[in-house]
């Protein structure tokens, strides 16, 4: 039997039923990890991804939660940990986008929604998962999903990129606080990928015009982001922590 880089590891991925989360969950499974998916609304999509994961010869479980709510996030993470027998990896991926709107015109309720899911949800997920990783006693890996927009100003997307910029700083702080426990913490900053979240932008700008922005000349596939996450969770990245890594086809170069 071929040993893959994450054999024997147990992972939880929020927002794992679709888009980037689906790509991440499948990439972890392909490297041998058992994977728990936390979804919010679409149980049919979560179950479909679970079936795809199991085709890789590993275990898959699903749990429902609104990660912006501490009680729901912590209960779902604990349920996944119980089902998988512990946790070694947590990927805080769940997020919501902002409609194209200036900061001055952003309604307070929309600001709170974006911060609730993208920032609070990421914090709650990791806060709930870390005790399970510590209990396993063999180190582990945390990966936050950010965006290249968080690394510079982004007019008309201010609430979204502000939430993700805060996630970057949270990742660095978690990295410093957990280093002594052997837990590595990083963030990935994806560029333009094929997801529902970016479909509106691709429609407005045009797919060819969007591709022209990227030096590699194409939109990324979610599995490509997943492979980077899998690498960060593996021993190949054993000396990497506290980083925000662009995965953007050269968009930010």
Image (cartoon, rainbow, N blue to C red):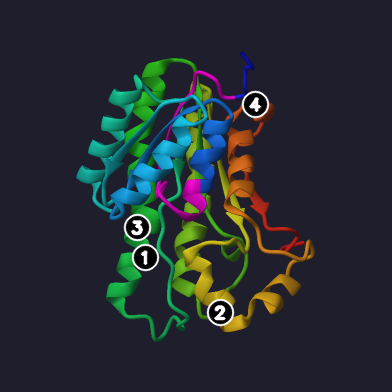
Q: Mark 1 points at which residue?
A: 114
Tell me which numbered mark, 1 or 2, is placed earlier along the sequence: 1
* Residue 103 in view, yes or no: yes
The reply to whether dot 2 and dot 4 touch (C-beta < 8 Å) is no
Q: Residues within 10 Å of mark 3 (few under 14, many from 20)?
A: many
Pointer 1 and pointer 4: residues touching (CB < 8 Å)?
Answer: no
For discs 1 and 2, the disc positioned in front in the rendered view: 2
Q: In the rendered image, which residue does mark 2 sit on?
A: 203
Label 2 secondary element: helix
Residue hosting label 4: 238
Q: How far apart are the alpha carbons under marks 2 and 4? A: 40 Å
Q: Which of 226 and 57 is in front in this view?
A: 57
- For the residues bearing labels 3 and 1, Cβ distance under 8 angstroms: yes
The label on residue 117 is 3
Quick check: marks 1 and 2 in contact, CB under 8 Å? no
Instruction: Name the element at disc 1.
Output: helix
Residue at mark 2 to residue at mark 3: CA–CA distance: 25 Å
Distance from disc 1 to disc 4, alpha carbons, whole Å, reads: 32 Å
**Badge 1 or badge 4: first in the primary sequence:** 1
Q: Quadrant of residue 96?
A: bottom left
């Amino acid at each position: 039997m071929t040993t893959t880089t994450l054999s024997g590891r147990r992972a939880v991925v929020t927002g794992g039923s679709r888009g980037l989360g689906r790509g991440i969950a499948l990439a972890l499974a392909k490297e041998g990890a058992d994977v728990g998916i936390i979804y919010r609304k679409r149980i049919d999509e979560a179950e479909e991804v679970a079936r795809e994961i199991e085709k890789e010869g590993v275990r898959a479980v699903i749990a429902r939660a609104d990660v912006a709510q501490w009680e729901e996030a912590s209960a779902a993470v604990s349920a996944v940990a119980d089902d998988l027998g512990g946790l070694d990896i947590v990927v805080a991926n769940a997020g919501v986008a902002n409609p194209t709107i200036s900061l001055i015109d952003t309604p307070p309720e929309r600001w709170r929604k974006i911060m609730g899911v993208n920032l609070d949800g990421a914090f709650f997920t990791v806060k709930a998962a870390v005790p399970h990783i510590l209990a396993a006693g063999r180190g582990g890996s945390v990966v936050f999903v950010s965006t290249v927009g968080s690394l510079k100003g982004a007019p008309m997307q201010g609430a979204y990129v502000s939430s993700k910029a805060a996630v970057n700083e949270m990742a660095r702080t978690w990295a410093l606080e957990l280093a002594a426990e052997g837990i590595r913490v990083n963030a990935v900053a994806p560029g333009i990928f094929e997801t529902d979240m970016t479909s509106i932008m691709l429609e407005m700008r045009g797919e060819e015009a969007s591709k022209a922005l990227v030096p590699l000349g194409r939109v990324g596939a979610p599995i490509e982001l997943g492979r980077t996450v899998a690498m960060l969770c593996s021993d190949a990245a054993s000396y990497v922590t506290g980083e925000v890594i662009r995965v953007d086809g050269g968009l930010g170069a």
